[in-house]
């Protein structure tokens, strides 16, 4: 039987994962699907229910251990692994939902062709904010491809696209797309 480490570090998750998820849920180390609206975004409400949710390990220490990362190894590397940074941003967005005056749903966007946006916030009026997370100190136009696709797909609903990155400058790519340092988040 595969170990939790092997299962959680493979992309994408396989059919073996459901064996370990109840244990991770019980230990509070993984969010249950729909517990924080981390379902897939679709303009068709019926499709939202059919698409796969995105799972997040909420214990960053466990997540790093399962990936074989050590403190010394991460300090020697150029940056943190992207999935750790994405899990951190997810946790922060979920916290903000708790105290924000504007009620939103936190979802993700993924097409059958592989276009993806890490997080989509939708308010009650159907307005969307797309958020990408990059564990890189520099940003280029291609880092906005998923956000551009979401904007082209939903021009009436799309309000802003944000790329959080580990750099130090706020960079506007156009009137709706901006890169923001994680340190400001």
Image: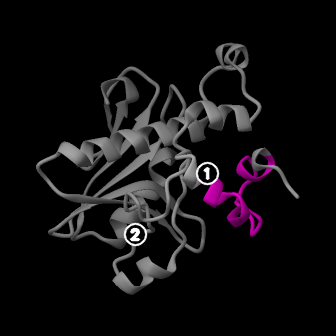
Quadrant that contains the C terminus: top left
Instruction: Give the Cα separation between the discs numbered 2 and 1.
Output: 25 Å
Is residue 93 on the magenta stretch?
no
Quadrant that contains the N terminus: bottom right
Point out the residue furthest to the right here. 1
Callout 1: SS: helix
Instruction: Identify the residue at image location x=48%, y=34%.
Output: 139
Compared to residue 40, the image places residue 178 above or below, namely above
Compared to residue 101, the image places residue 168 above or below, namely above
Q: Which mark is residue 24?
A: 1
Camera-side residue of 51 and 117: 51
Range shown magenta: 6-24
Q: Residue 41 carries which label?
A: 2
First of labels 2, 1 by sequence position: 1
Question: Left or right of 46: which side holds 50?
Answer: right
In the image, residue 50 lies at what x, y percent?
50, 81
Compared to residue 185, the image places residue 8 above or below, namely below
Question: Left or right of 98: which side holds 144?
Answer: right
In the image, residue 117 lies at what x, y percent?
46, 56
């Amino acid at each position: 039987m595969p170990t939790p480490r092997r299962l959680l570090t493979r992309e994408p998750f396989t059919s073996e994962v459901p064996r370990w998820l109840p244990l991770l849920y019980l230990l509070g180390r993984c969010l249950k699907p729909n517990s924080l609206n981390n379902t897939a975004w679709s303009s068709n409400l019926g499709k939202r229910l059919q698409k796969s949710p995105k799972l997040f390990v909420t214990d960053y220490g466990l997540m790093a251990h399962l990936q074989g990362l050590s403190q010394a190894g991460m300090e020697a590397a150029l940056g943190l692994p992207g999935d750790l940074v994405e899990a951190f941003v997810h946790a922060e967005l979920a916290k903000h939902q708790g105290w924000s005056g504007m009620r939103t749903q936190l979802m993700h966007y993924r097409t059958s062709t592989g276009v993806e946006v890490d997080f989509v916030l939708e308010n009650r009026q159907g307005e969307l904010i797309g958020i990408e997370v990059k564990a890189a100190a520099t940003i280029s136009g291609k880092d906005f491809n998923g956000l551009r696709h979401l904007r082209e797909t939903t021009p009436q609903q799309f309000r802003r696209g944000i790329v959080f990155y580990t750099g130090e400058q706020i960079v506007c790519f156009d009137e709706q797309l901006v890169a923001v340092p994680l340190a400001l988040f």
